[in-house]
Image: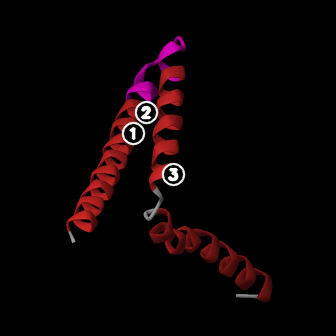
Amino acid sequence: MNRFQRSITTVLTAAFLAPLAVLPIASRASEAGKRNTTLGLGAATGYLFTRRGSKVPAFIGAAGTAYAYSQYQKDINSRHRRERAARAA
């Protein structure tokens, strides 16, 4: 393997492995970030439902919106639980 092929292989490998390094960071979004994600997905889903044609992407978007909302609500409930514990202590 010559030097050019080796460098291309290295760059492509790094490009495919980089998202794996960022993934754990993305899973720790703030409550506001989760809210914004939910609102953005909801808006995109609403747009997809108003378009003519296949509704499959809209239903996939609806499922994503529901999951994002459940994570947002879980984060809110966890914050309320922490605040109640802090007041009780």
Residue ID for mark 2:
61
Percent across and percent down for residue 27 are: 43, 63
The numbered mark at residue 88 is: none
The numbered mark, 2 or 3, whose residue comes first in the sequence reads: 3
Task: State the extent of the magenta-drawn residues as a range.
Answer: 48-59
Is label 2 in a helix, a strand or a loop?
Answer: helix
The numbered mark, 3 or 1, whose residue comes first in the sequence reads: 3
Q: CA distance from mark 2 to mark 3?
A: 18 Å
What amino acid is at disc 3? Gly
> At x 53% / y 29%, what residue is drawn?
44
Is 50 inside the magenta-drawn segment?
Answer: yes
Is label 3 in a helix, a strand or a loop?
Answer: helix
Is label 1 in a helix, a strand or a loop?
Answer: helix
Image quarter hosting the C terminus: bottom left
The numbered mark at residue 33 is: 3
> How many other residues sit within 10 Å of disc 3, few (<14), some (14-19) or many (≥20)?
few
Residue ID for mark 1:
64
Determine the residue located farthest toward the right in the rendered image: 4
Percent across and percent down for residue 85 are: 22, 65
Q: CA distance from mark 3 to mark 1?
A: 15 Å
Q: Total of numbered circles in the picture?
A: 3
What amino acid is at disc 1? Gly
Whether residue 11 sits left or right of residue 24 in the image: it is right
What amino acid is at disc 2? Gly
Q: CA distance from mark 1 to mark 2?
A: 5 Å
In contact (CB < 8 Å): disc 3 and disc 1: no
